[in-house]
Image: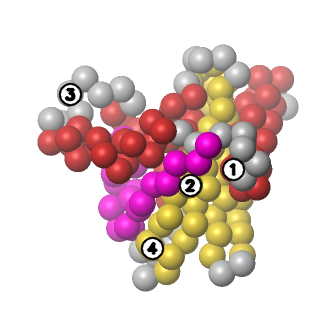
Amino acid sequence: MKTICLFSDGSCLKNPGFGGWAYILEYKGVSKEMCGAQADTTNNQMELRAVIEGLKALKEPCKVELFTDSSYVANSINLWLGGWLAKNFKNVKNSDLWREYLAVSSKHSVKANWLKAHNGHPQNERCDTLARQSAEKLQKGI
């Protein structure tokens, strides 16, 4: 099974408001980046959307080392998701996105790693820039 690094970030100009997401996939020195935007969303939704879209881009089952500056995403994946699933997501925010995450992550082995935001990590900074620019473009109608 290939080991892939997935860097992700989400942005929201107001919370809720115009949001953007971005990811970078890296494997053996090759990288692929993608970004997108959505209106009337939240920062947490965009953080999770970035992870979902990154996983959807993988063409085969992989061991995924996820790097995110969202403690919400990292803790949810590593600690809370099993309990949420056991109680059928009762009283869990963004349950539709978490169900989508479960569907796209099911064939992969995902370990989430938390990064401090705006701390000079090159891929995290790049994802932050792409996500913010995507939200700004949507806000301006570009």
Query: In whole angstroms, how far apart are the C-alphas of marks 4 and 3?
Result: 30 Å
**Residue under label 1:** 124
Image position, residue 94 (x, y; %): 39, 30
Residue drawn at (63%, 76%), measured in percent from left and top? 27
Q: CA distance from mark 4 to mark 1?
A: 21 Å
Q: Mark 2 = which residue?
A: 67
Structural crowding at the residue carrying mark 4, measured as other residues with C-alpha within 10 Å and reported as few (<14), some (14–19) or many (≥20):
some
Q: Residues within 10 Å of mark 3 (few under 14, many from 20)?
A: few
The answer to whether the residues at label 1 and label 2 have Cβ atoms under 8 Å apart is: yes
**Of the residues shown, which amino acid type is indicated by label 1?**
Asn
Residue 98: quarter of image? top left
Asked if marks 2 and 4 touch (Cβ < 8 Å), the reply is: no
The x, y position of residue 58, in whole percent, is 53, 68
Front disc: 1 or 3: 1
Identity, as a three-letter code, of the amino acid under mark 4: Cys
Q: Amino acid at mark 3?
A: Lys
Residue 7 position in % (x across, y down): 61, 56
Mark 1–mark 3 CB contact (< 8 Å): no
Quadrant in which the N terminus appears: bottom left
Q: Is residue 102 magenta?
A: yes
Q: Is residue 131 shown above or below 56?
A: above
Q: Nearer the viewer, mark 2 or mark 4?
A: 2
Q: CA distance from mark 2 to mark 3?
A: 27 Å
Characterize the local packing of mark 1: few (<14), some (14-19) or many (20 or more) Cα atoms within 10 angstroms.
Answer: many
The local secondary structure at tag 2 comes to strand
Pick whichever of labels 1 and 3 is earlier in the sequence: 3
Mark drawn on residue 62: 4
Please report the bounds of the magenta region as a residue range.
98-116
Q: Earlier in the sequence, mark 1 or mark 2?
A: 2
Measuring 59% from the left and 48% from the top, which residue is drawn there? 115
At label 2, which amino acid type do we have? Answer: Phe
